[in-house]
Image (cartoon, rainbow, N blue to C red):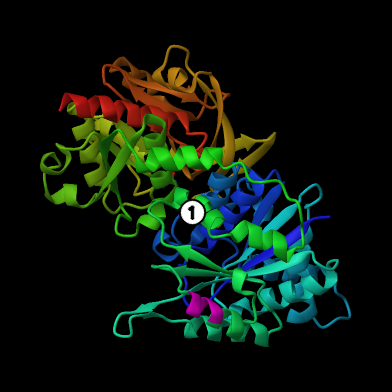
């Protein structure tokens, strides 16, 4: 029978609850258990798809086309198990569902209330589809005390009573701030946070305490007494140099042992942490370094590019180098020559993006990479910018642009109004809804034999995740290919360009999809492995 671990957060947000959940999942998996992670988000958006990256960070896309919370990226990277649309739910989705049922008449005669209707939907979501799993870890977004979190806390409180005895454990992640003037780690905020949890009927079994220094035994004792947890269940979560050190650190601090003890599981297999040791060793002892410029729009808020950053780190793990990132807001290149900012970098990456701001700067960055033979990687928007640049510079089409910004006589990137997925025709109009209506999720592509892309992947048929509304316009293909700008990956029906690359350049690849979403530290995405390899070669030239 599946066991449940509920992870809540207290004191402040941004303590890394997603990472803590993913790391605990990885430790249980390393003991041979089958594990799944799920996230409950108390906000009212139906999904994070329409939120600005400044609000929410990256929007992580699953194979089945859900736009989800970026914590699902951590779950996939740490467990290697693809998440689905059923692994993230928001208050908005629950209400949308309940209200549509109400309108249909499904609740005829009943008053619909938060308890039991909303809480029942939350419980159904948590329990659904968990056959064959040993542990389901459920992370509750936000912090204890948030008004919108209450139905979720109530639902998990109820669940503990409904599951068989000993099948639910509560982990509470908190912060022990160090107060310099007192020279002490303070436990009071944690005491308050646990008091708040207990007032709504939840007694944590394990306290995971973020702290920038070891917790003295006196504070540990205090936390145990005041928060009503065992002293051994006050687990220290020290700041780590790399997120990939966290599973090892939590294991050393006793987290997984304490969880198993809380479930009264005796004789669990010891974890095999070999792969985490290898990853941690490669990250902490690199044999060289490369510098990659990321030229984008949301560069002051790098959570917007979470998976890109991680995939670049993975490329470094594969090549045994440290990857330094140089963040550049693309608008800079509208005012200044890119040369002074890009001459010392070993690779240039333009990530996904939306809207017109900064595009001319991105186009200037592409031109610099193309002309100066610097490895270039364009992802989604980045590929579209590369096509616009090539059309302007190689074909002389000064008006070349994307219809995302305005009508143009040379629409080298245009709105996709019709496509087929899973045998179903999807149609979109320029004035249609914006939520959940992009080309989303996994789509197949075929790579041209003899292309760089086919060589990198080592195969010709691939499947990658998409999240975009506009497509490169195939009518410009022949002209661009005559100039060595090759369309090396296409949708199987030959209509949608998926990969472009430049002949006679050390490494110039644009992809319409998001390869960063499928990279894992122990299974590095071939494009990131190859890009960092090319950057390493470049660094040896300089
Ligand atoms: N804005 C572009 C589009 O919608 C690119 C999107 C992206 O980079 N994810 O097609």
Q: Position of residue 116 (x, y in %)?
A: 80, 78
Badge 1 local density, few (<14 within 10 Å), some, or many (20+)?
many
Q: Residue furthest front?
A: 217
For this orientation, the residue located farthest to the right is 109
Decide: is 25 above or below 262: above
* Residue at 48% from the left image edge and 82% from the top image edge: 187
Task: Indicate the quadrant containing the C terminus: top left, top right, bottom left or bottom right.
Answer: top left
Q: From where the camera sits, is residue 160 visible?
A: yes
Residue under the point 73% across and 74% down: 155
Q: Is residue 429 left or right of residue 363?
A: right
Q: Quadrant of residue 119?
A: bottom right
Q: Is residue 395 visible?
A: no
Disc 1 within 8 angstroms of ligand 1 (CB): no
Is residue 111 placed above or below 79 in the rendered structure?
below
Q: For numbered disc 1, what is the local secondary structure?
A: helix
Q: Pinpoint residue 458: horizontal percent, then vertical percent.
A: 50, 18
126 drawn magenta: no
Q: x and y percent of residue 378 in the render? A: 35, 36
Nearest to the observer: residue 372 or residue 292: 292
Q: Residue at x 52, y 34 (%)?
A: 523
Magenta residues, dominant SS class = helix
Label 1 belongs to which residue? 246
Looking at the rendered image, the quarter that the N terminus falls into is bottom right
Horizontal relation, residue 244 to residue 68: left or right: left
- Per the rendered image, the range of residues in magenta is 217-221
The residue under the point 46% across, 19% down is 454
Judge by depth and name the residue closer to the eye, 140 or 277: 277
Q: Nearer the viewer, residue 481 or 21?
A: 21
In x, y percent, where is residue 522?
51, 36
From what the image shows, is residue 115 above or below residue 416? below
Q: Is residue 539 left or right of residue 442?
A: left
């Amino acid at each position: 029978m599946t066991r449940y671990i509920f992870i809540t957060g207290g004191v402040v947000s941004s303590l890394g609850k997603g990472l803590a959940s993913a790391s605990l999942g990885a430790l249980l998996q390393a003991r041979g258990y089958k594990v799944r992670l799920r996230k409950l988000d108390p906000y009212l958006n139906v999904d994070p798809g329409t939120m600005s990256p400044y609000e929410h960070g990256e929007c992580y896309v699953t194979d089945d086309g859900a736009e989800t919370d970026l914590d699902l990226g951590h779950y996939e990277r740490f467990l290697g198990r693809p998440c689905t649309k059923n692994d993230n739910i928001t208050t908005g989705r629950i209400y949308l569902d309940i209200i549509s049922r109400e309108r249909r008449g499904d609740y005829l005669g009943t008053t619909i209330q938060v308890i039991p209707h909303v809480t029942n939907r939350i419980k159904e979501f948590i329990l659904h589809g968990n056959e064959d799993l040993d542990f389901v870890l459920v992370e509750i977004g936000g912090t204890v005390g948030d008004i919108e979190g209450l139905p979720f806390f109530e639902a998990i409180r109820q669940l503990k009573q409904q599951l068989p005895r000993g099948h639910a454990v509560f982990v509470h992640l908190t912060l022990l701030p160090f107060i310099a003037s007192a020279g002490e780690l303070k436990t009071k905020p944690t005491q308050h946070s646990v008091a708040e949890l207990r007032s709504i009927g939840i007694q944590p079994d394990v306290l995971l305490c973020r702290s920038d220094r070891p917790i003295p035994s006196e504070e540990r004792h205090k936390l145990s007494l005041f928060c009503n947890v065992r002293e051994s269940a006050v687990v220290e979560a020290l700041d780590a140099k790399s997120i990939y050190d966290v599973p090892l650190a939590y294991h050393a601090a006793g987290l997984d042992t304490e969880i198993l003890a809380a479930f009264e599981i005796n004789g669990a297999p010891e974890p095999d942490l070999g792969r985490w040791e290898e990853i941690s060793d490669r990250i902490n002892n690199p044999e060289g370094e490369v510098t990659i410029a990321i030229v984008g729009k949301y560069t002051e808020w790098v959570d917007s590019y979470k998976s890109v950053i991680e995939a670049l780190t993975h490329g470094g793990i594969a090549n045994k180098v440290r990857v330094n990132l140089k963040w550049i807001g693309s608008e800079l290149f509208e005012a200044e020559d890119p040369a002074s900012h890009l001459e010392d970098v070993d690779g240039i990456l333009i990530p996904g993006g939306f809207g017109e701001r900064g595009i001319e700067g991105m186009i200037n960055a592409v031109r610099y990479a193309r002309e100066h033979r610097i490895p270039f990687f364009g992802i989604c928007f980045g590929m579209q910018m590369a096509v616009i640049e090539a059309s302007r510079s190689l074909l002389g089409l000064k008006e070349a642009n994307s219809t995302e910004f305005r009508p143009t006589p040379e629409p080298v990137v245009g709105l996709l109004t019709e496509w087929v997925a899973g045998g179903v025709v999807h149609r979109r109009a320029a004035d249609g809804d914006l939520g959940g209506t992009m080309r989303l999720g996994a789509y197949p592509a075929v790579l041209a034999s003899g292309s760089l892309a086919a060589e990198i992947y080592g195969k010709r048929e691939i499947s990658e995740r998409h999240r975009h509304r506009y497509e490169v316009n195939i009518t410009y293909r022949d002209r661009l290919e005559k100039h060595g700008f090759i369309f090396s990956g296409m949708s199987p029906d030959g209509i949608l360009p998926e990969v472009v690359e430049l002949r006679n350049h050390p490494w110039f690849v644009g992809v319409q999809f998001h390869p960063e979403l499928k990279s894992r530290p122990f299974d590095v995405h071939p494009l990131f492995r190859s890009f960092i390899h090319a950057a390493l070669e470049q660094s040896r030239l300089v």
